[in-house]
Image (spheres, rainbow, N blue to C red):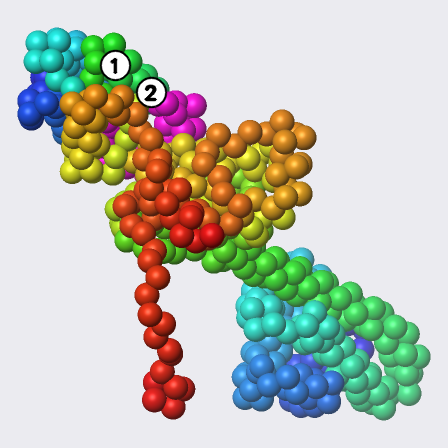
Amino acid sequence: MDRIPVLKLGDALLVTVQVDMHDRLAAALEEDLTGRIAATGAKGVLIDISSLEIVDSFIGRMLDTIAAVSRMLDADTVVVGMRPAVAITLVELGLELRGVRTALNVERGMALIGRRSDAGRGGDDGGGDRDGPAAEDIDDDGG
Amino acid sequence: MAQNGSGSVAQAVAAHQDEIFSEWLALQMESGALRSGRIKEAELRTQCRAFLEVLREGLAEGGTDADAPVFGRAKEMLTEVSRSRGMQGFTPTETAAFVFSLKRPMFNALNRAIEAAASEGGGAVRAASAATARYTWDVTLLLDQLGLHTMEVFLKTREEVIARQGREISELSTPVVKLWDGVLALPLIGTLDSERTQVVMENLLQTIVDQSAEIAIIDITGVPTVDTLTAQHLLKTVAAARLMGADCIVSGIRPQIAQTMVHLGVELDVTSKATLADAFRVALTRIGRAVVKAPRVEAPAAGRR
């Protein structure tokens, strides 16, 4: 049976979905990925779905599950490169994937994970609070 | 002269075709068919001549019933004329006048034919005058039906034009503009219904991909009312953009709208700012840019630009 390769890239795991996902493939990926996170102690999981053209509720839920499981294993999941049509479909299906972080492409996704692990090293909780003190600075300037 | 009605009408039209044509054309010109400048005289002349030809053929082949298949070509021609006039922006009266102004020339031709028949023999006068009423009725009926057909096509064409304009407006009114590298703005104007939201959403998502934008500002200053449905549409757009990896900021919520939304129990679970400027400021900080003061540079004088 086909399997989707899981690549280790520093602190992160990179999964590139190049084929259309069928249910068994998705289930296998979930299992593989969980095993690899536990084995490598990865801090981030990057799932590139830029070649994925068809998505159904099962795949959507699988993404959510992977995110939840990785979170439990202390890894962030970032889904990158979702196509507009796929995004619209997922929203119409009611799957907003609230537990999943997203980025436009792999580069940005890696940056997101990198930022998180940097923050982790610095003892910060690394939450996505991107408009913290800087925003206030500018407000002061403007006022 | 004991012929059936249609035969006589056909004969009359065939015999006086040229007179009918010139009279008809003169009548149309008189009523200002060319005044608007939308149609040239030569074009009108061609249309009239061709229509008169198929009408004569129809009459010659059978009856004065406009629904008969022999008038199929006449109707086709009217459809074409009416459609082109509908597109060119003719008024309904102008379009209908094309057919209805044919009445008088036709009646005149009939009269002439009947007078000619009457002058042939003294006994035929009574019969001819009796026939006049019947022929008149036949011709009136035929032309009225054709006129109605013209109007139907005309209205249909106008409706198509309106529908097309509606589509164009909905596309025009949803531009996605780039404010900065990676920052898009979507100024929404007008009511948000499901169909428009779909167009807006697709536009926005595609532009996010094309420009690899990180932040999209949805400005709803131009949205007159926000009800639960509109809010839901907005949230869907925001959710879809987030799935693609872009953040959304909603701006331009007017005070009254904010109040209404709270009263309705609608909650926009996104970053929202009062004005587009505020939203842009937030966007800039998120992408790590700042606006700083610099010495003023005057715009070059108009002559030197």
Query: Which residue corresponds to mark 2?
Result: A99
Q: Is residue A87 above or below residue B114?
A: above
The span picked out in magenta is A77-98
Q: B12 left or right of B130?
A: left
- Give the quarter of the figure containing the N terminus of chain A: top left
Residue that appears at 11% across and 13% down: A41
| Crowd band around label 1 with a 10 angstrom C-alpha radius: few (<14), some (14–19), many (20+) | some
Instruction: Determine which of the numbered discs, if any, sits on residue B76 in the image.
Output: none
Q: Is residue A53 above or below residue B21?
A: above
Q: Is residue A78 magenta?
A: yes
Q: How many marks?
A: 2
Residue that appears at 37% across and 45% down: A137
Q: Are marks 2 and 1 in contact (CB under 8 Å)?
A: yes
Q: Which amino acid, by three-letter code, is at mark 1?
A: Arg
Q: Nearer the viewer, residue B259 or A115?
A: A115
List x then y, in percent, for residue B56. Answer: 63, 75
Instruction: Determine which of the numbered discs, if any, sits on residue A71 in the image.
Output: 1
**Residue A142 in view in this figure:** yes
Could you tell me which chain the residue with mark 2 belongs to? Answer: A
Q: Are marks 2 and 1 on the same chain?
A: yes
Q: Nearer the viewer, residue B58 or B270?
A: B270
Q: B22 left or right of A100?
A: right
Residue that appears at 21% across and 13% down: A74
Residue A63's image quarter? top left
Q: Nearer the viewer, residue B151 or B276?
A: B276
Q: Which amino acid, by three-letter code, is at mark 2?
A: Gly
